[in-house]
Every structure is written in structure tokens, then in C-alpha cells.
Image (cartoon, rainbow, N blue to C red):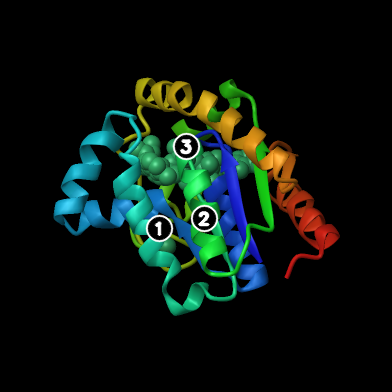
Amino acid sequence: MNLVLLGLPGAGKGTQAKKVADKYLLPHIATGDIFRKEIRDETQLGKIAKEYIDSGKLVPDEITINIVKKRLQQDDCQHGFIMDGFPRTLHQAQVLNKMLSSLGRELDLAIYLDVEEELVIRRITGRRVCEDCGAAYHVEFNPPKVAGVCDRCGGHLTHRSDDQEDTVRKRIEINKDKIDKISSYYQKNGVLEVVHSVGGIKQVFKRITEIIEERRVK
Ligand code: AP5
Ligand code: MG
Ligand code: ZN
């Protein structure tokens, strides 16, 4: 099953992608998480990515596409994946299709997590993320069992450097039109499903799994 999750910052892509990955035993490919790891490791790529990310801009396509290309070649991706945060431009979506078809594969499903802008601001300002595994929590909507500690791996929970309200608003503005273009592209390809990403994490997950089961993608 080759799957992508689309949505504005704070739509719940990372939260839901992790749950889908656990349930269907798929590798979770999150370009944002990959960049944040490079930043923590203080690599050359991390230095470049940090400037774009902290100012709320997209990392240039050629850098991001290269990372995804390499990731898709790894063994664990040969039977499927769930992507979160990629594609983010129409060009990335078109290149992903080409990458998959060159491997004799195709995208099975693109789920667009639709959510109101004001709600994403609340979600992001209350978010805490695990430094080690990238899991997201929310002080009000999804608190960890022990404050400041990741339930999954015991890692330390922090704020993301790009989660300041003005940067979040900029991220939303930059992403809005691009998501519309990608959605139209996937709609034409017959792989788009829209899920309203409100009503709690479990409920959204239920909607997603229903779609996956209905499509009987493997
Ligand atoms: P990325 O890390 O992908 O960030 P994003 O798209 O801005 O999305 P977020 O991670 O902020 O939100 P999310 O949808 O994952 O929400 P979450 O599940 O955490 O990218 C960061 C940056 O990297 C980009 O700005 C860009 O610079 C660069 N980048 C990455 N990919 C790129 C690409 N392909 N091309 C170019 N540049 C790229 O949920 C948010 C909060 O809400 C959490 O606290 C969660 O607990 C809570 N929550 C989730 N669902 C619910 C619910 N249903 N009810 C209540 N609370 C909920
Ligand atoms: Mg995320
Ligand atoms: Zn963790």
C-alpha cells in the first residue's frame, strides 16, 4: 500500500501517519522529521534546511526530492509506505508518480486531512514533540502519560522551533494554494479522499482506516 497524507500544518498528518504505520506495518516517511534529525545532527543538510524551516518556507524541491528518492530505495519501502509532508508542491507530486512508475508501482491513496485554519493554530501552539521519535502530543488534546516524556520511547518532549504563531501563519499561507493544486492533481488521478480532521484523534483514525479498508489497497 503506497499512501500519502496531505494537509495544512497541524492538520494531524504526523499523528495519523504514525497510527497508520503501526496498524498496517508500513514505514512512515516524514520529510519534516528527516530534516529535524539532520538539524539535530548538525549536518550540512541540516544547516541548509534549518534556515528555510525556521522562517516557515519550503525547503527547495531538488533537496527534498533527492531525500525521498533515496529513502524509497531502502528495503523497508519495497512493499509500501505512508508519507507525511511529501509531496508539498505539484512538482513533488508529479515526481513521486514518476519515481513510483519507474519501480512498476503507483500511488494507491492520497488522504487530504481537511481542517479549519484557526483550529490548527490551537493545535500547533499546544503541541509538544519527541526529540527522538518525532511523536506529537498536545498539552490539552493528547497529553503524554508523564509530562515532558514520550509514551512511545521515553524521549524528551520539546517545542518545535517553527511553532511560533507568526511562523505557523506563514506556513499556512505558503502551503494553502499548493495543497489545493496537489489535491486537484490527485483527484484527477482518482486517488484522492478527503477526511475532516476534527473530533479527536481516534475518530479521525477510524475514518482513515475505513477508507483504507474500503479501497482494499494492499
Ligand atoms: P512538517 O514537519 O511536515 O510540518 P507541517 O506540514 O507544517 O505539519 P506539522 O508537522 O506542523 O503538522 P501535522 O499535520 O503533522 O500535525 P500533528 O500530527 O503534529 O514540515 C516542517 C517544515 O519542513 C516545513 O515547513 C518545510 O520548511 C520543511 N518541509 C517538510 N517537508 C517538505 C517538503 N516536502 N518540501 C519542502 N519543504 C518541506 O498534529 C498537530 C497537533 O495537533 C499535535 O499536538 C496533535 O497532538 C494535535 N492533534 C492532531 N490531531 C488531532 C485531533 N484530531 N484532535 C485534537 N488534536 C489533534
Ligand atoms: Mg508533522
Ligand atoms: Zn518518542
> Type of residue at label 3?
Thr
Q: Is residue 111 visible?
A: yes
Instruction: Please indicate whether residue 36 sits to the left or right of residue 197 in the image.
Output: left
Whole-Å distance between the Cαs marked 2 and 3?
14 Å
Which badge, 1 or 3, comes first in the chain's sequence?
A: 1
Residue 18: give x, y in percent of width and height.
56, 60
Residue drawn at (47%, 25%), measured in percent from left and top? 172
Residue 217: give x, y in percent of width and height.
75, 65
Which badge, 2 or 3, comes first in the chain's sequence?
A: 3
Q: Is mark 3 within 8 Å of ligand 1?
A: yes
Residue drawn at (53%, 25%), measured in percent from left and top? 176
Q: Residues within 10 Å of mark 2 (few under 14, many from 20)?
A: some
**In the rendered image, which residue does mark 1 sit on?**
68
**In the rendered image, which residue does mark 3 sit on?**
89
Residue drawn at (73%, 41%), measured in percent from left and top? 195
Q: In this view, which residue lies farthest toward the bottom?
A: 75
At mark 3, the secondary structure is loop
Residue 27: give x, y in percent of width and height.
52, 68
Placement of 96 over or under 159, stated as above or below: below
> Type of residue at label 1?
Val
Instruction: Please indicate whether residue 167 sits to the left or right of residue 11 in the image.
Output: left
Residue drawn at (61%, 66%), measured in percent from left and top? 105
Placement of 55 over or under 104, stated as above or below: above
* Viewer-nearest of discs 1 and 2: 2
